[in-house]
């Protein structure tokens, strides 16, 4: 039962970190019933980031978009068919973000406005950093003086010299310990600043992600985006450490060493040191820039492999139904092969970089040792001076080595952060007006009238779903919207909820254009019961409370009684504290829909949509649920809109709006529409209620015979 309780968020790292993932996993390892797998793996995260197909399937997606009329709360498989002509590219990097702008953004996070405490911590950390480097450079000077003081005749009285040497030894040890101590204090003080900056960036990114347009989420690859965001968040820590603990200290220490060598031993030593710094830095930067494209290729291949693996598991039933286990395994293996080739290039180029860096530094160290030995031989330098030069130059090896690794890590971290910061540049089209929008205030007497005035809208500009559609949903009435597939029924919900804006025309609620009011106030006034209720892997209590986070336990118990869930909860060992499982797999479809109605009651919205709320249920469960809905949502209390395929479920509506090809073809009550035999509603009703199976079979048989005759001719 490997996959029963496994969540998608737990699977993503599995594919990311296990490069040698067995490609026959799909063929042999699944023993859990298919329904459980689908319930377990189709998490809310996966639903949000719906899988968009490869470029060769664009025609299929475009065709499906013509029927993109499903509600926004449907399964990700249905949502993925509504890819908009508006292109959002995050993983494709069409939205540019420069490294300099990312660094500026990071600096603002560690030097925030109106936060004096953080600024003081940064100043203290930088001061400790400078003190640590000054003490570190002082260590070779104490070493030099100890050696020079020991160059005496020890057969004579050396009491004073011994005291001096002892003091120098203590100073030598104190300087070394002080340098380490200051460094550790710096780390401790700056830790809260760094972690707070990481938290702030991650929270801002997540909040922006939740505020992105629905179409953006539908156009992103599952797995790839989540992995890119995860890498970017971790990259922030690396960049902050590189900037504060390495780049500034390295620059400072190299400047001090070059100044000491130039002042005490002449420009020749400083010239060799400076030339070494330039050669080392130039080689490191150029080689790292050359290597970056290999790392980018590896990241892209990694994203692709994660998306392929996750997509295959989400659509596990389809893979089994079409016997395509081998195909999916090959597809995953091909993605890993791309990653393998890119990773080999990364490792090979790294070996070349390390060898070049060592050659440059070793050459410089050898040259300066030769110059120092010449000075000692000529009497211009003491043995202590030779040791000092050797120590200073050798001491540069540590920051120089860090320079290479830090630059490489920083480039990699900036690359990993690229997608994270690109989110800040992706435009949000569905938003409040600049300067703020007023709240939606409904009529007190009878709230919730909805008007469509000449509304035209399409997910693709050249394929409109609604065309100059005009109709009115009276306040306080029960209204049904019906029509053939692709007529625009569920698109109406998306437009009223303002997941999309109309191309032309306007939508009014109680006489107010929904584009002129705040999104928050608009969506507070609308409640939805979807076909498939999205549940969190939490308790029944918290899942119901999600409809109104401020509701009390008593309020929740009241709505539970109203939707007739109290018997179920009493039979459960943990009652309201029962975990419903991933996607609510521990309860039945009818019970999930009753939970959705309980949420709706807690929200207490004056406008309610029932978006094919019973279409996935069996007849007995459907009728029981409809009875509950009719008992709770009585006429005159709320504006109730039902979107349905099964006409029998909405026959008691006050008004039925029949859509066809994006326009209102007819409207009226059930009896009125049914009285006209030529009406579309009457035809749909007859198809559903008076279907003659024998005639259908005979028709299909005759149709098959005609096709056979045609083939023979």
Image: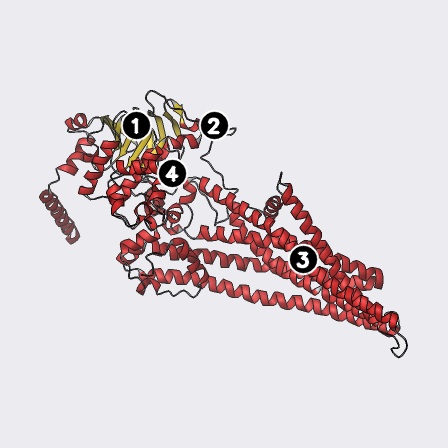
Return the disc, 2 or 4, that comes first in the chain's sequence: 2
Foreground label between 2 and 3: 3
Return the disc, 3 or 4, that comes first in the chain's sequence: 3
Marks 3 and 1, Cα distance to the nearest angstrom? 66 Å
- Asked whether disc 3 touches disc 4, contact meaning CB atoms under 8 Å apart, the reply is no
Circle number at residue 437: 2
Image quadrant holding the N terminus, namely bottom left
Q: Is residue 191 left or right of residue 218?
A: right
Marks 3 and 4, Cα distance to the nearest angstrom? 59 Å
Foreground label between 3 and 1: 3
Foreground label between 2 and 4: 2
Rendering coords of residue 120 (x, y %): 67, 45
Marks 1 and 2, Cα distance to the nearest angstrom? 25 Å
Marks 2 and 3, Cα distance to the nearest angstrom? 51 Å
Q: Residue at x 68, y 49 (%)?
A: 124
Q: Which SS class for mark 2?
A: loop
- Residue corresponding to mark 1: 638
- Asked whether disc 1 touches disc 4, contact meaning CB atoms under 8 Å apart, the reply is no
Q: Residues within 10 Å of mark 1 (few under 14, many from 20)?
A: many
Q: Is residue 96 visible?
A: no
Circle number at residue 499: none
- Residue corresponding to mark 3: 183
Vertical order, 50 against 143 (above or below)? above
Marks 2 and 4, Cα distance to the nearest angstrom? 28 Å
- Residue corresponding to mark 4: 460
């Amino acid at each position: 039962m490997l996959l029963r309780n496994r969540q998608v968020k737990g699977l993503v790292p599995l594919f990311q970190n296990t490069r040698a993932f067995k490609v026959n996993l799909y063929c042999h390892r699944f023993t859990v019933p298919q329904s459980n797998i689908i319930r377990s793996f189709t998490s809310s995260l996966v639903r949000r980031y719906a899988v968009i197909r490869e470029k060769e399937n664009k025609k299929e997606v475009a065709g499906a978009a013509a029927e993109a009329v499903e509600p926004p709360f449907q399964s990700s498989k249905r949502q993925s068919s509504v890819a908009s002509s508006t292109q959002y590219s995050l993983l494709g990097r069409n939205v540019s973000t420069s490294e300099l702008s990312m660094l500026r953004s990071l600096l603002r996070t560690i030097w925030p406005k109106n936060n004096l405490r953080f600024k003081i911590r940064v100043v203290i950390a930088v001061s400790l950093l400078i003190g640590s480097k000054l003490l570190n450079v002082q260590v070779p000077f104490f070493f030099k003086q100890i050696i020079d003081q020991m160059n005496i005749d020890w057969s004579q009285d050396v009491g004073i010299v011994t005291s001096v040497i002892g003091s120098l030894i203590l100073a030598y040890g104190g300087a070394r310990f002080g340098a380490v101590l200051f460094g550790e204090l710096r780390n401790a003080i700056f830790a809260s600043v760094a972690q707070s900056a990481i938290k702030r960036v991650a929270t801002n990114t997540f909040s922006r992600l939740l505020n992105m347009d629905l179409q953006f989420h539908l156009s992103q690859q599952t797995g790839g985006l989540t992995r890119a965001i995860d890498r970017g968040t971790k990259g922030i820590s690396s960049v902050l450490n590189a900037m504060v603990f390495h780049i500034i200290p390295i620059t400072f220490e190299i400047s001090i060493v070059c100044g000491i060598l130039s002042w005490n031993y002449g420009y020749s030593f400083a010239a060799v040191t400076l030339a070494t710094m330039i050669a080392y830095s130039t080689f490191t930067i150029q080689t790292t820039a050359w290597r970056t494209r290999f790392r980018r290729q590896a990241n892209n291949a990694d994203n692709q492999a994660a998306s392929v693996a996750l997509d295959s598991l989400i659509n596990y039933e389809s893979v089994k139904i079409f016997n395509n286990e081998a195909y999916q395994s090959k597809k995953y293996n091909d993605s890993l092969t791309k990653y393998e080739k890119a990773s080999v290039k990364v490792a090979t180029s790294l070996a070349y970089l390390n060898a070049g860096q060592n050659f440059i530094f070793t050459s410089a160290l050898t040259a300066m040792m030769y110059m120092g030995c010449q000075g000692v031989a000529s009497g211009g330098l003491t043995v202590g001076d030779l040791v000092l030069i050797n120590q200073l130059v050798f001491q540069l090896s540590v920051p120089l080595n860090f320079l290479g690794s830090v630059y490489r890590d920083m480039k990699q971290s900036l690359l990993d952060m690229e997608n994270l910061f690109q989110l800040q540049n992706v435009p949000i089209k569905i938003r409040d007006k600049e300067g703020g929008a007023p709240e939606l205030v409904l009529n007190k007497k009878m709230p919730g009238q909805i008007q469509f005035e000449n509304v035209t809208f399409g997910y693709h500009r050249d394929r409109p779903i609604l065309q100059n559609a005009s109709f009115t949903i009276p306040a306080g009435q029960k209204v049904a919207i019906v029509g053939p597939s692709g007529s625009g029924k569920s698109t109406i919900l998306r437009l009223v909820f303002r997941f999309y804006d109309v191309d032309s025309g306007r939508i009014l609620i109680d006489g107010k254009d929904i584009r002129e009011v705040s999104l928050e106030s608009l969506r507070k006034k609308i409640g939805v019961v979807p076909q498939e209720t999205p549940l969190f892997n939490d308790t029944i209590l918290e899942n119901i409370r999600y409809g109104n986070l401020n509701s009390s336990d008593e309020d929740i118990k009241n709505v539970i009684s109203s939707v007739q869930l109290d018997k179920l909860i009493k039979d459960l060992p943990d009652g309201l504290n029962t975990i419903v499982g991933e996607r609510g797999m521990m309860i039945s479809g009818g019970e999930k829909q009753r939970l959705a109605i309980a949420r709706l009651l807690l929200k207490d919205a004056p406008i309610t949509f029932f978006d094919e709320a019973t279409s996935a249920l069996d007849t007995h469960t459907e009728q029981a649920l409809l009875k509950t809905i009719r008992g709770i949502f009585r006429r005159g209390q709320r504006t109730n809109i039902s979107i349905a395929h099964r006409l029998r479920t909405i026959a008691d509506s006050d008004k039925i709006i029949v859509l066809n090809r994006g326009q209102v073809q007819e409207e009226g009550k059930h009896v009125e529409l049914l009285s006209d035999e030529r009406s579309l509603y009457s035809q749909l009703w007859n198809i559903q209620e008076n279907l003659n199976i024998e005639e259908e079979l005979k028709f299909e048989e005759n149709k098959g015979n005609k096709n056979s005759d045609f083939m023979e001719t």
